[in-house]
Amino acid sequence: NSLPDQVVVQRIDERLS
């Protein structure tokens, strides 16, 4: 199951923080 780009971007943003 692939998550939507919105969720993926949010996850990546949190990791970069």
Image: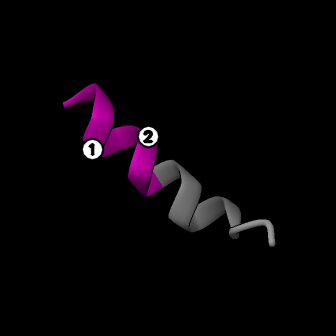
Amino acid tagged 1: Glu
Q: Nearer the viewer, residue 2 or 17?
A: 2
Q: For the residue carrying disc 2, how many other residues have a C-alpha within 10 Å: few (<14), some (14-19), or many (20+)? A: few
User: Which residue reaches farthest left?
Assistant: 17
**Is-magenta flag for residue 9?**
no
Q: Is residue 12 magenta?
A: yes
Q: Can you tell which quarter of the image residue 12 is in?
A: top left
Instruction: State the SS at label 2.
Output: helix
Q: Is residue 4 left or right of residue 9?
A: right
Q: Is residue 8 left or right of residue 15?
A: right
Q: Position of residue 1 (x, y in %)?
A: 81, 72
- The residues bearing labels 2 and 1 have C-alpha atoms spaced at a distance of 5 Å
Please state the horizontal and vertical placement of residue 7, each as a whole percent of the image.
53, 65
Residue denoted by label 2: 12
Q: Which residues are magenta?
A: 10-17
Residue at 70 percent across and 69 percent down: it is 4
Residue 5 placed where, x, y %? 67, 60
| Mark 2 in CB contact with mark 1 (< 8 angstroms) | yes
> What crowding class fits label 1: few (fewer than 14 Cα within 10 Å), some (14-19), or many (20 or more)?
few
- Residue in view at x 56 percent, y 54 percent: 8
Q: Amino acid at mark 2?
A: Ile
Under circle 1, the secondary element is helix
Vertical comparison of 11 with 1: above or below: above
The answer to whether 10 appears left or right of 8 in the picture is: left
Residue, disc 1: 14
Q: Residue furthest top?
A: 16
* Quarter containing the C terminus: top left
Label the magenta part by its dominant secondary structure.
Answer: helix
